[in-house]
Amino acid sequence: LFFVHAYGGGVFFYRELSDHLGPDQPFYGLQSAGLDGKGAPHERVEDMAAHYITEIKKIQPRGPYYIGGRCLGAYVALEMANQLRARGESIGLLAVLDSYWMPQEPAARGRGFMLHVRNLSERGFREKLRYLVVNAGYRLVKTEMALTRVVSRVCFAFGRAIPRFMMNFYINVYIPEMHGAVERRYAPRVYPGLITFFQATAEIERDPRAFWGKLTSEGIEVIMVPATHKDILVEPNVHVLAEKLRAALDESREGS
C-alpha cells in the first residue's frame, strides 16, 4: 500500500493508520522530494507522480497497485493511477482520504489592490491600523517566500543544501505554500477506474461526487468514517478508518 504526502511533504501523519493496518500489510509513505533541503522539490503534480512511480516500482515491479493519499496526495495518487494505467499496469485500489478540491479563479490584475482600498474605507482608525499590520505581516511572508525560492534554486543549481538558518521557514512555510500552488495548477484527467472515497461523517454535507465523481468513468464508492476532516487519521477514529480501508483492500484483492 503506497500513500502520498500532503502539503507539508512529510508522511509520518500516516503512522497510526499504518500501525492499525497491522504488520502483515506493507505500507509505504511517499515523501516529497526536496524536503531535506538538499534538492529541488517538484513543481508539477505530473512530475511528482512520475517520480513516485519510479520509486514504487523498485519495491513492486508490477501491478496491481494499491495507492492513495490525502489533500495534495490524493491528486498525486490520481495522476499516478492514470500514468500507471497508460503503461498497461492495473490499479487494485485508488483511495482518497476525505479530500476536496475547490478551483480558484485567477485574480484579475488590480483586483487585490481595489479590495484593500475597499476594506480600509469600511473600517475605523483602529481597525485600519490593525488591518495594515496584518497585511504587512502577510507581505513579509510573501517576501520571504520569494527570497527562499531564489536562494533554494541557486543552492540546488550548484549542488548545495539550503542554509541551515532558512530550513525552518523552508520546511514549515515554503514547502506547504509551494505545494498548495502546485495543486491549484493541476488539471486532473478522468481516471478509467473506481475511486474509493473515505469521507468523514462531519463532512456529510459535502458531496465528493461533485468533483471526484467527474474524474472517474467507473464511479465513486463513498465509505463513511466517524470523524472530522482533521482527526480522521488519529485516535479514536483512525482504527475505524483502518478497518474500512482493510476491508476495501480485501474486496479489491478478491475481485482481482
Image: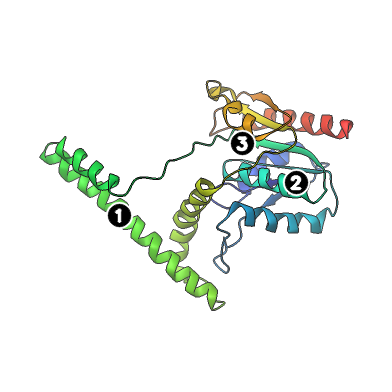
Marks 1 and 3, how far apart at CA: 33 Å
Can the viewer see residue 181 in this picture?
yes
Q: Residue at x 77, y 30 (%)?
A: 248
Of the two numbered discs 2 and 1 on the same chain, state the one appearing first in sequence: 2
Task: Check the image and name the residue furthest to the top.
Answer: 205
Q: Secondary structure at mark 3?
A: loop
Q: Nearer the viewer, residue 166 or 253?
A: 253
Q: What residue sits right under mark 1 in the picture?
A: 139
Specify the amino acid type for callout 2: Phe
Q: What residue sits right under mark 2 in the picture?
A: 27
Q: Residues within 10 Å of mark 2 (few under 14, many from 20)?
A: some
Marks 2 and 1, how far apart at CA: 40 Å
Q: Residues within 10 Å of mark 1 (few under 14, many from 20)?
A: few
Marks 3 and 2, how far apart at CA: 15 Å
Instruction: Name the spot of residue 102 as percent of width and height, x first.
Output: 49, 36
Specify the amino acid type for callout 3: Leu
Of the two numbered discs 3 and 2 on the same chain, state the one appearing first in sequence: 2
- In the picture, the disc for residue 120 is none
170, above or below 239, in the image: below
- In the picture, the disc for residue 233 is 3
